[in-house]
Amino acid sequence: MTTMNKSNQDTESKKWLNFILNLDKRIVYVFMFFAVCLPFFLNPVVDIKSTPRVQSAFDLVEEAAKNHKAIMIGFDYDPSTLAELQPMAVAFLRHAFSKNVPVVGINFLPNGTSLAASTMDQIAKEYGKKNGEDYVFMGYLPQPTLVLLNLGEDIRKSYKVDYRGIKVDDIPLLKNIQNYNDFHLVICISGTRMPSSYIVYGVNRYNFNYVAGVTAVSATEYYPFLQSGQMKGLLAGMKSAAEYESMAGRLGDGMRGMASQTWGHITIIIFIIIGNILYYARKRMDVK
Amino acid sequence: MFMFLKKTVPFLITLGMGIYTFAYYFMPHRAMQNIWDQLSNWAIIVGGGSMAVGIVSMFRTYYKRSMNRADPNRYYCMITLVCMVGMAVIGFVTGIGDGTLFNDLFLNVMLPLESTMFSLLAFYIASAAFRSFRLKTFSAGLLLFAAVVVMLAQIPAGENISKQIPVIAAWINEYPNVAAQRAIMIGIAIGSVATALKIILGIDKSVFSGAGKV
Amino acid sequence: MSTNPWIWIGAILTLLVFSYLWKENPFYRLAEHVFVGISVGYLVCITWFNVLKPKLFNPLIIDHEYILIIPFIISILMLFRFSSKHGWISFWPLAFLIGFSGYAIPASIDANMLKQIQATVNVSFGNDFMSILNATIILVGTLSCLIYFYFSIPHQGVIGRVAKLGSMLLMISFGASFGFTVMARISLLIGRILFLLRDWLGVVH
Amino acid sequence: MLTTKKLQTRFFLLLMTLLVVVVAPVFAEEAQTSSAQNPEQAPLVTLTPVADQGSVLVQGMDSENDKGGSIDLSWEIRDPVISANATKIQIFRKAESDAEFTEVKHMDISALKYADKKEVQDNIKYSYILNFLDKDNRKVYQSGVMGPFVAYPQWFNTSKFATLFFAFITIAIVLLFIQLAKQGKKFYVRPLGGIKAIEDAVGRATEMGKPCVYVPGISVIEDIATLASISILSKISEVIANYQSRIVIPNYDPIVYSVIDEVVKSAYVKAGRPDAYRSEDVYYLTGRQFAYASGIAGLMAREKPAANFFLGWFMAESLILAEAGSMTGAIQIAGTDSISQIPFFIVACDYTLIGEELYAAAAYMGQDVRLLGGLKGQDYVKLFLMLTLIVLFILKLCGVPGIDTILVGGN
């Protein structure tokens, strides 16, 4: 009689284990969803140690402020890599505007043009910056190699008007800007191969301070450039954006995103552990 | 004669093209380059023209389904047809440039659908890890270990647990990973040479199997 | 909350697709069928405006490059696929396109075979223990993984053990690739959630 | 009448001819280079330093390994005064028949070289003058007249010699074993787990009376993964046709669709049941990656297939397909040579053909001895490569020079 009961109990708990083991992906989904979602409401701070390659990017913007020189940002990302790259762009813009560094934006990716324009306008508004005086977005041009070469000579060679259609000569900010020499720093933010084009057609020839912001997946491709000094700094993925934000002292999407990332990764790892415990629990029961 | 047209001519075309494209790789001469430019241009056009085949096939399948009264999905299939024709007509009427309705539909309907579909992977990657990362064997353990270490290395928490985690992750990526991927790539190279050879020389007939009876 | 109708459409479609996570349902089915239809319509226009018009129609009709009649005819031959009697005619254009795989022979040898072997030969043995170990892993690892893929010998004895080592390295490699992808995938989800919470609902700033 | 078979038997001959055609020009070219010792020819092909050697060294030659129509110019400034001032360079050119020099390029000096392709014709003698300018466009230095140089096309790209050699070895070994197999030699190949699984899955589907879903990947027809996938499909569809079960194949590329349609149709004809072929089951779905994935995810959920096959080239959609498929409880078999996607198939499918196993699979299925011979040949190529690797490595350890670029043609 007792054995009967026991085996009943066993099948009960086995059933339950089976239930959890097979079920429910959906539970995993729900946890995953909340892990990613909640940090956006909680404004958490993740303890991030700064790395030299982000620090040097940050320092270059500071130097630009000291030297009263402008910086140029290439917004070469589209909605598909927005989550990783937009926080970097925003962090750079916030840092520059807060230190009164003029920013010139360019773009070689047609899907990202309007995104870049609205990002610049929005962040400029936060700091009361004027389009044409404190910042300007030049809009999209095809054939990046040609444009990058021309930028070494004269920006007017490629760009006749800015994104709003205003003539380059009528833009106060561009009066004193001719080529790469007039920028303290050039940044390319992209999930494509564009950052290497900047090196091949820009840095190699005209030798300026250059920093790239890339997705975490593609970061390894760019380490050699960092070693050779062709890149002065490298931001890879959300983690770098979060680092940058904590340096600049203003937390934004990078930090929140990093919190989401952290919780997402931890959720997966916890589920792997649970899965293994359940698996062994059932195996032991099977052996019995 | 019929067999000649049906089997031998395609075989000869493939063989000729195969030999030419093989030789082109080694021969930069203008004569070869010009032929290549011409042929690859044609291939692009034929590739574009083949869209007609795709549309006919897709239309036929969805039309059949939407006319099949037994099919519970028939109304959905009608929606597909309407969307397809609608999108195409809008594109031809307005053009595809910035600011057109076509572009708006692309940006506001297609892109959200694509990126949402893409983002499902975040859930799937979690559930796949939950179901399959089991310490069943030593090999499975290695898979699990490598994945967990790399995942930890990418978040600040990993560094806070141990300074060594990012170092180990980078090491895994640079050495064992490189060795394994190299071997796969070399194998792929050999396999693809053999496969291309068998197809071009008609040793593997599956691609041009043709109807068994004439 | 957004007042832009496009944002609303995007948000609703996003939710419809997410509903698939629960199970396949009429809402997802709607999104799926709209998605497939729109994507094909999109491809038709893109193919016309980016390929056929500039490469075939304009040169042929406006610039009178009559040689382009050949690819035009080849394209037409493809349509014989739908004839039950003359379906074989469509083999000709297919044969033309399949022939391009000849290029894969040297290209694959160059990129996948020789470059990889060369890189393996070029590993440098340093003086410290770690760099010798690392170089050994590359060299022995590559060879043992190649043996794992060897079809002619059963995985027994010494060969079996070497193949086992190869398979372990493969597992480590796959685990690492898996782990590396997680971050990018979660970023995509963050992007969608931001779209819902910020652009649509406006509850997060 | 000319038949395929006859052609195939003549094929060694053909290959040899091909190789002769490709290789012969190399030797011809070598002969040409050596004949360049002839003083009259010499300036045309060899490096010719012109202008006074002391301050600026300017060189020109025909661009190597190209289609013709290009002359390489390079300069090296040795005089510190010139190098401190010169920022731009102006290149003037004169063809033999022209009266005067005309400017062909005005460029930044830092590149140190320029490939002149501007309307350069083959076999015409060109002379050049280079002007070095400072930043206010004042002339710092002018080279003497240099040349004449002649551009000509090369028949063989000498930097690809190793590729040709290995292509020849690989092709020869594979064909040798195919020939041996044809002559009736028996070969052993170890069993491959995934193959048995494919056969079992098809069998299970026919038993259960449920369909199979077959996804041929998202690449073009000339991609080897696609061709291998079609090869496997031709075997599967024969079984399907014989047992009167159903296979659904949504396609990503219209051309791949055309071939697959034919392959499946002919399998039904072979089985003597051409009427049983359902054209709406083999169809073009869409050519956008995620629309394709969403369509197949929906399809699998509704059709509740007994088996799913994902064989071919895949990208990020791999895990969407595999996870959506696993929810339906089907047996899943995947195979791809897309290295980044193999891990996802491994964790979410029952069997995965890794890399070249995908190409080998068709040889395992069915009784075509020639395919098996090819597979055996592949193994011997692999052996050859492993030995090459070891030998080169030992040579390098012994300090033989040039080993570190021997396979990649010096670049």
Image (cartoon, rainbow, N blue to C red):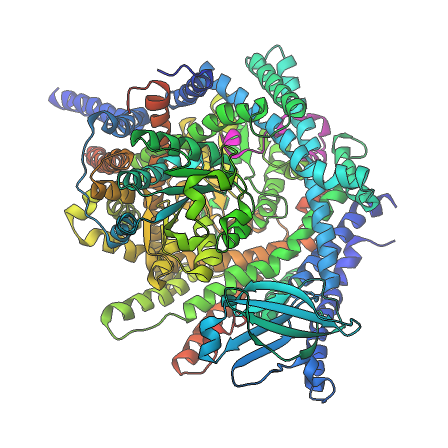
Q: Nearer the viewer, residue D123 or A146?
A: A146
Displayed quadrant of residue D234: top right
Report if residue A119 is visible in the image.
yes
Which quadrant would residue A175 be assigned to in this image? top left
Spot occupied by residue A82 in the image (x, y as percentages of width and height): 39, 35
Q: Is residue C202 left or right of residue D9?
A: left
Compare residues C99 and B84 and report the one nearer the observer: B84
User: Does residue D279 show up magenta in the picture?
Assistant: yes
Q: Where in the figure is residue A269, as x and y percent of width and height?
A: 24, 38
Regarding residue B211, the answer to whether it shows in the image is no
Left-right relation of B48 to A121? right
- Location of residue D33 by image quarter: bottom right
Q: Which residues are magenta?
A: D264-293
Task: Look at the image and tell me in which quarter the C terminus of chain B lies.
Answer: top right
Residue B180, position as x, y percentages in the image: 39, 57
Nearer to us in this view, D219 or A169: A169
Q: Is residue C98 above or below residue D261?
A: below
